[in-house]
C-alpha cells in the first residue's frame, strides 16, 4: 500500500452548499482549480435570461446542478459520463479514468433538526499513488477505499441503492474513443448515454436514464 498520508492529499471540506466545487477541486487535487465565482458565471451562461437561476440554490449559496459540473469539466478538456448501474463496474478501465463522482441523497439540517428537502451531494473518488480515496467533503479527512478490487466492491455497494448515481470523469479523447471501457462491445448503443447539456433548462438526475427508458 502507498505510504502517502491523508495530510499529503488535497481535501476540501464542506462549506455551505459548495459540495460541487469541493468535488471538482478534490478531483484535480488543487485548491484553485475552480472558484465559486467561476461556477456562478457558468450558471449565468447556462441560463442568462432567468432571474432565478435554475442551476444553483435560490440564494446563490451553491447547490450546483449537474450542468454546471459538466461545463466546468469541459473547460478542462474533460467530459462527464453517466455510468449505467445495470453494468458491473468491472467493465471500467481505471487507467483511462481521471476520477469518479457520485451523486447521493443529502439531508438538509437546521441545527440538529433534519428538514425533509430533497438535496443531493457530490462526492469524488480519486486514485492517488495506486490507492483509491473517498474525498467526500463531509469527511474529516480523506478515507482510503483501497485497491481496484476494493473499489469495485465499494461501487457495487453504493449503486445497490437506487437513489445513487455514478459519473465517470475522463479526458475528451477518452470519451470519444470510449477507452474508459475495457470492452466497448459490452455496452450497446442503447445501454449507455453521454449527458447532453440543455441550455436554459435545469437537468435533474431523474432525467438521466438509459436510452431505452428502463
Image (cartoon, rainbow, N blue to C red):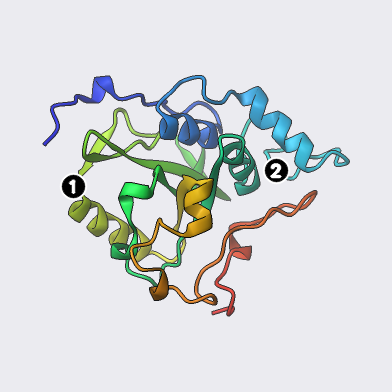
The residue shown at (31%, 28%) is 140
Front one among 117 and 129:
129
Q: Are marks 2 and 1 in contact (CB under 8 Å)?
A: no
Q: Is residue 155 above or below residue 26?
A: below
The local secondary structure at tag 2 comes to loop
| Residue 73 picture location, percent across and down | 56, 39
**Relative to 118, is 178 on the left or the right?**
left
* Mark 1 neighbour class, 10 Å CA radius: few under 14, some 14 to 19, many 20 or more: some
Task: Give the quarter of the figure containing the C terminus.
Answer: bottom right
The residue shown at (57%, 69%) is 209
User: Alpha carbon of mark 2 to alpha carbon of mark 1: how far?
Assistant: 35 Å
Mark 2 or 1 closer to N-term?
A: 2
The local secondary structure at tag 1 comes to loop
Q: Is residue 202 above or below residue 27?
A: below
| Residue 117 picture location, percent across and down | 58, 50
Which residue lies under the disc numbered 1? 147
Which residue lies under the disc numbered 2? 55
Say which mark, if any, is on residue 28.
Answer: none
**Relative to 135, is 84 on the left or the right?**
right
Amino acid at each position: 500500500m502507498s505510504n502517502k498520508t491523508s495530510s499529503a492529499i488535497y481535501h476540501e471540506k464542506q462549506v455551505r452548499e459548495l459540495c460541487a466545487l469541493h468535488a471538482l477541486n478534490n478531483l484535480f487535487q488543487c485548491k484553485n482549480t475552480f472558484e465559486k465565482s467561476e461556477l456562478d458565471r457558468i450558471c449565468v451562461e447556462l441560463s442568462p435570461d432567468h432571474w432565478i437561476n435554475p442551476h444553483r440554490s435560490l440564494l446563490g449559496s451553491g447547490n450546483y446542478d449537474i450542468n454546471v459540473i459538466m461545463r466546468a469539466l469541459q473547460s478542462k478538456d474533460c467530459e462527464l459520463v453517466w455510468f449505467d448501474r445495470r453494468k458491473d463496474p468491472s467493465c471500467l478501465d481505471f487507467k483511462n479514468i481521471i476520477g469518479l463522482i457520485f451523486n447521493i441523497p443529502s439531508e438538509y439540517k437546521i441545527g440538529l433538526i433534519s428538514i425533509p428537502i430533497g438535496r443531493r451531494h457530490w462526492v469524488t473518488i480519486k486514485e492517488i499513488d495506486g490507492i483509491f480515496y473517498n474525498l467526500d467533503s463531509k469527511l474529516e479527512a480523506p478515507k482510503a477505499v483501497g485497491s481496484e478490487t476494493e473499489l469495485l466492491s465499494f461501487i457495487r455497494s453504493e449503486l445497490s441503492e437506487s437513489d445513487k448515481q455514478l459519473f465517470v470523469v475522463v479526458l475528451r479523447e477518452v470519451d470519444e474513443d470510449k477507452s474508459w471501457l475495457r470492452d466497448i462491445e459490452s455496452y450497446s448503443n442503447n445501454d449507455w448515454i453521454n449527458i447532453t447539456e440543455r441550455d436554459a433548462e435545469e437537468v435533474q438526475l431523474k432525467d438521466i436514464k438509459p436510452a431505452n427508458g428502463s
